[in-house]
Structures are given as structure tokens and as C-alpha cells.
Amino acid sequence: MNRRRFFRTAAGAGLALGANAIPLLTHAYAFSGQGGLSKVEARHYRKLPDREVECRLCPRNCKLGDKERGYCGVRENIEGTYYTLVYGKVCSLNADPIEKKPFFHFMPGTSALSLATAGCNVNCKFCQNWEISQVRPEQVRSFDLSPAEVIDLARRHNCPSVAYTYSEPVVFFEYMMDTAEAGRRQGLRNAVVTAGHINPEPLAELVKAVDAVKVDLKAFTQEFYTDQVRGSLAPVLEAIKAIHHSKAWLEIVYLVIPTLNDNLDDIRRMCRWIIKEIGPDVPLHFSRFHPMYLLKNLPPTPLATLEKAHAVALEEGLHFVYIGNIPGHQAENTYCPKCRNMVVRRVGYEVQKIEIRAGQCRFCSHPVPGIWT
Amino acid sequence: MLSSTVVSVHAGGVLSVDGSVDPGKIKAALAAGLKMISGQGSAEQSLKSLFSPRERVGIKINAIAGRKLATRPETSLALAQLLAESGLPSRNILIWDRTNRELKEAGYNLNLALEGPRVMGTDTNGFGYESELSSHRTIGSLFSTLLTRNTSASISLALLKDHGMAGVTAGMKNYYGAVHNPNKYHDSGCNPYIADLFDSSEIKTRHKLTVLDALLVQYHRGPSHHARWAERLETLLFSLDPVAADSAGWAIIERLRARAGLPSLKEDGREPAYLFTAERMGLGNARKENIRLVELEV
């Protein structure tokens, strides 16, 4: 299939992506597909004796023999050299409202060219995109898209930013870095949606290349990370602190899952940690869970649970607390922490009004942190 | 639990100097082991007791590490030949693994035709993985349709190897090649994932026999091939108990490691604890005192 036909076919697939989303490729469900693999040497690994390598990209630090792949399934040791198999192998590409990520304090009302490759370095039982994140690259249809082509597509679709999202961008680190650096040179901004399961060294590089990072903080207990995520909480907390101390804008999302991570004491502890370590101005989104992947036995999060979590966060002193996946809820809006006037009105992914001028509340001139234009 | 029998057949000279396999000798070794494993008078009768003529038998091999360290095509084809000689239509025999590329790299000629033992990977057009997730214990995976839709009974014809994470990879772990996401089951020494995966109905209800290819055993730095730590053992192991087969394989790995002056897997922090998990789940015997080892020479 040539490129023109691929795009035409994908656009005709009609994915449900929200009111303003423009599907440019389609999620791939054909698991027997013969997806091409890249062979670009990976960054952040070290060579060991006997053709073994140790990946240093994420806290798993996978130690791999020849022909073995890491936990992510997209990085392979080939005769003692470590390669990314998904450089430029895009399996999902859309022009999304930036609010869908969600970013609420980063270029509101704009679209982000949003892309993903296959793979993920955790395995959340509630993954909303498991068809692309929990598979190997051979099992999805993907398309070659160079960093230059990504930038060109962003311009053609009026997207002032590129978002690395859907699966786990950490696993396509090299492609993300090259695209972000090239995009920035041409005036594009870059936003990352991640679980934050990344080692300090690659993260330090990443935050220099991108403008905003949204971290999915899955819970505030290691037990949850062990049982539901197959990952570790501590490195995620370290990543959040490091992002906060960088120049990149940070937002945090907490998907509230009934019975598993909706304990209000844990949520309160998390809020206190956020205030102590990174201050009250980081936006915190409590999102509604929908049954998915391996957690189909639980109901969607009751609205009352989300509102209780929201109230706890406000009580603890966080300034910008949101409720997500409940279109039309008043907690989708941004309120000035000083005068309490509404400064951004949102309904779902749509931004209806912005009352922020030069980073300040239009009513009282109190600073409202974020990247607003 | 009653004790389990593992039959070890040594076939001296089955490997030539260049590493190729003598087809006649490997078939003789297979026949000897199969005859002994079920106590029948012959390999043919033994296979008949395990598989009805209407069965569709999958032979799950391990081609992942390339030609130097894969289940040998000569071994797979000889087993398929013995199955056919026992009355199973050859079109009902399927030799398979994850991908056609890996099969070809391991020296297999693909056979997608309806006649003869078929040889193919899950990624063959028209096959692939199931679209519905199967969830069992810690496992959430899409199974190969070669297993779920094209076989009613399964033989794990696996390689015996040291494994950097699991300690030992053998017959049970061979079924990692039956799911779309084996990379997700390698942490914690693959424990309890190997046992949990084997316990899934897709595998447990089909698995009938383990045959371990221990012709060339990678006893250190596995699962990749390293000639320095690969021993030409020229042995096949057989068992109806999947846990006992792998446990007997583990003992071989330990023996070879000790002989080479290497630490035991336990000392190396890689004891295959999944075998004891499997035993606790009632999948078979892991402990040496419950395994009867029968050694043959052909």
C-alpha cells in the first residue's frame, strides 16, 4: 500500500476520537500483520561481555542476551548491539485537541499532532490503548514517518505542537527525541504523555527537548504498582520531581479506579507529597476509569468518588484540580486561585473561553502558571 | 502426588562434527524414548495411546535463537514421521513457532500446504493471534490461532537451555511462543508466569507430552548461543509430566555448570522457582525425590 492510499484508507476508518480529532492513521487491530521493523541503534544502554547488553532507559534495566527483547518488546539486542525496532514506525497518528491528553495549562484550544508506536514498559491491567501498547511491533500495522514528515504533517494540520502519546513514548525515546529537537528548531512545541517510568539520565535529556510532560501517576502505593501496573512507584515520583525542576511544564493525571486506588487517605497522602515536593500549582486531574483490557469486572468510577478526591485535593491546598472524562462538569474549568473567578471555561475537549492575559488572571492579575500561547 | 517418570535417551554420535543431526539416529532415539514413556510395546503403540487418529497434533518447537540453537528440524520431522507412522494423517501434524522468519533462520522449510506435516509460524497470513484476550491468573494474552484453532493436542518439543531470567528454559516456557506478549512475563524470574501460562486452558487441555532437545545444551549465558558454554550432550528427555521433564532438565544444567566450575543457579540468584510454583498448582512434580529417571542408550 502506498502512502497516499494508506492515509486515505486510514482516514476512512472513522475512529471515534472525540469531536475535534482528525484521524490520520488508524489503530491497528490486525495482529498477524507483517509490520516492518527499524534497526536504529538505541541510546541509553551498555554493552556487556558475551554479546549481552543492559538497557538503561527505564528502571527495569533489562539485561538481554543476543536476539532478546526488553520488557517493552520494541528494543532488541542483535549480536551485542541494542536497537530500537520502532524508530519512525508510527501506528497511531491523529490531530487531537491538546485537552484530550489532557493538558489544561498548555496551549489551550489548540490541536496537537499526536502519535505513537507500539510498545510499553509497564503493563497496566486497565490500559485504554492495549491494542498498540501491549503488543510487539510486528503485531500492528505501522507506517514509516520520518521526523521531518511529522513536522510537515503538524504544519499541514495546523497543529502548533506534537504530542507523543497513546502507548508509552519512553520506549520510542530515540524517535521522540529526534522529532522533538527537529520540531523545536522549526517552531513546534512538544508534549509527552507518559507513565514516568524512566531513568534519570534519559529523562534529563528528554525534558530539555520537550515543552510539556503529563505524567500518569497510577496510584500512591507500591502495592498497586506491583499488582496492577507491574512497575515501581519510586522512580515515577523521582521523575515527577525532576520534570518539575526542569523547564518543561508538568501536569499529573490520576485515573481513579473503584476499589483499587480510590482510598481517600492514599489520595490525601499523594496530595501532601505533591505540595511538599513540587508545590500547589501543578495541575492534578482525577480521571474517570472505564472498564478495559484486563479490568472489565469493575464499574466506571462513580462521579461521587471523583468529587471526593477533588475535594480532598483542594482541602490539601492544591490550586488547580480537575475532574476528567465527565464532559460538562464544572471541575473541567480553571479557576483563579486568588479571586476564584473562572479563567478557562471548558466543555469536554472544547475550550469556550480564556480569561488569562500574559499568564495572569484577567480579573485580579494573579499569575496562573502554564504555557498559554 | 504419584512419582513421575522422565526418560533420558542418549544417542551417541547423533551430532556430526559440524553439528548436523543424523536423521536415522535421532529417529531411533525418539522411538526408544516414546516406547519407554508409556510402557507400550513400541513407539507406534505409545503414540496411539496418546493421540487418536482424528487428533490434530501441534509440535511446538523453539526457533528463537537461530540455527545454532534451535529445536533441530531433523528432530521435529522425525517426530512428525513417527506420528504419521502411528496412524495420524500427516495433514493433521503441525510443526510451529512464532514467526516464519525465525523458523527459516533455524533451518526449517515452511510447508503451508495441506499435505505433509505443515510447518509454519503464527504470523502466516490467515492465521495470527486470537482477537479476544484470554485472562488467567497473572496472564492476559492473545493466543496463537495455530494452537487454539489448529491443534487439539500438543507436544512441547523444546530446547533445554540456561536462561538469564528464568534460570532454565525448557518445555513449559516453550509455550511463551504461543502468546503475543511473552516479553511481559520475564520479570520475577518468570515466576509465576510460566506456571500460570501453562495452567491456562488453551495449553493445559492440549499438552500431552514433553520432549526436550538436549542435543546441544547451553548451560550458561543462555538463552543465546555461546559455543564456550554449549555442551554436546546428544540426549533427548521425555515425560508425560511437564514439570518433571523440566526439573530433570534443570538437574542436567546444574551438573554441567558444576563441571565447568560455575555457580549453581541458586547461587547465581536464578533458581527456577517457577517449577515449584507449578508443582504447588498441581501441574506436576518438581522435586527430585518424586521423579524416576530412566536412562537409555541408543
Image: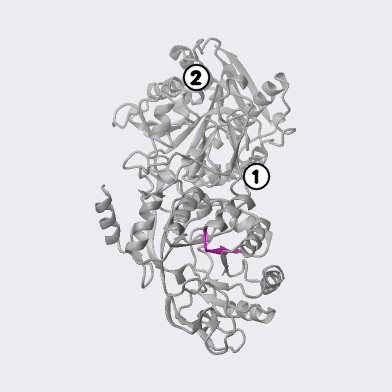
Q: Which mark is residue A318?
A: none
Q: In the rendered view, would you say A119 is above or below B99?
A: below
- Tag 1 secondary structure: helix
- Please name the amino acid that badge 2 sits on: Leu
* Chain of the residue displaying label 1: B
> Going by the image, does B121 lie left or right of A194?
left
- Please name the amino acid that badge 1 sits on: Ser
Q: Nearer the viewer, residue A336 or A197?
A: A336
Q: Quadrant of residue A353?
A: bottom left
Residue A323 in sight here = yes
> Going by the image, does A241 lie left or right of A114?
right
* Chain of the residue displaying label 2: B
Residue A275: horizontal and vertical position, in percent? 69, 72
Residue B206: horizontal and vertical position, in percent? 47, 39
Give the labeled residue for mark 1: B188
Residue A7: horizontal and vertical position, in percent? 28, 56
- Tag 2 secondary structure: helix
Q: Nearer the viewer, residue A170 or B229?
A: A170
Q: Which residues are magenta?
A: A210-218
* Separation of marks 1 and 2 at Cα, in angstroms: 35 Å
